[in-house]
Amino acid sequence: MHTEGFLSPETAERAREQFEAVGPTAQTTVREVTKAMDFDSAEYDERVTSAVVETAREAIFASLLEVTVGSREEFETWCADNPDYEREVIGNENVDRVVWHAAPFADTVVAATFHERETAAVGTLRRQAFGSIYRRVVTDV
């Protein structure tokens, strides 16, 4: 079992603070990517909207979420040790590896099962966690 990432906000307020903190990184990332794509200032102004920067912020925040990668048995043990958490599991129940992210302020753990493609499972789980837990906490949606 191992852990990747480092964002694991204990409270909704902390999640909002951490989301706000990645805003400048998102703006810089978008600006540098558009430079690499040779956008002139007119094209930048036309194509880079606040929605583009917000999408980058969401993706960066999600990519930093702390996740645990382990066996199904390790996940089940974690769940048994944390019985108050609602479980959201995507994937096949017959697969023996799991990646999960717990959000204490939401009393929720989201998980994804996988067989071989750990990196893909981690990315999928982080997007799932953002969509099902964090989006409603950190945005006005």
Image: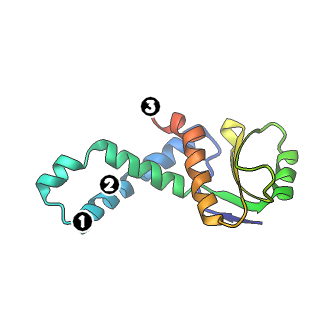
Q: Name the residue under label 2.
A: 27
10 Å neighbourhood of mark 1: few (<14), some, or many (≥20)? few
Q: Between disc 1 and disc 3, whose residue precedes? A: 1
The disc labelled 1 sits on which kind of residue? Met
Q: Mark 3 points at which residue?
A: 140
Circle 3: element type: loop
Circle 2: element type: helix
Pinpoint residue 89: horizontal percent, then vertical percent.
72, 44
Q: Name the residue under label 1.
A: 37
**Residue drawn at point x = 55 percent, y = 45 percent:** 130
10 Å neighbourhood of mark 2: few (<14), some, or many (≥20)? some
User: How far is disc 1 from disc 2 in space, using C-alphas?
Assistant: 15 Å
In the image: residue 23, left or right of residue 68: left
**Residue drawn at point x = 46 percent, y = 31 percent:** 141
Instruction: Single out the mark in the foreground, 1 or 2.
Output: 1
The disc labelled 3 sits on which kind of residue? Asp
Q: Between disc 3 and disc 2, whose residue precedes? A: 2
Pinpoint residue 14: horizontal percent, then vertical percent.
56, 44
User: How far is disc 1 from disc 3 in space, using C-alphas?
Assistant: 31 Å
The disc labelled 2 sits on which kind of residue? Gln
**Residue drawn at point x = 18 percent, y = 61 percent:** 39
In the image: residue 39, left or right of residue 127: left
Pinpoint residue 121: horizontal percent, then vertical percent.
63, 58
In the image: residue 51, left or right of residue 60: left
User: How far is disc 3 from disc 2 in space, using C-alphas?
Assistant: 19 Å
Quarter holding residue 25: bottom left
Q: Between disc 1 and disc 2, whose residue precedes? A: 2
In this rendering, is residue 98 above or below 79?
below
Pinpoint residue 66: horizontal percent, then vertical percent.
63, 57
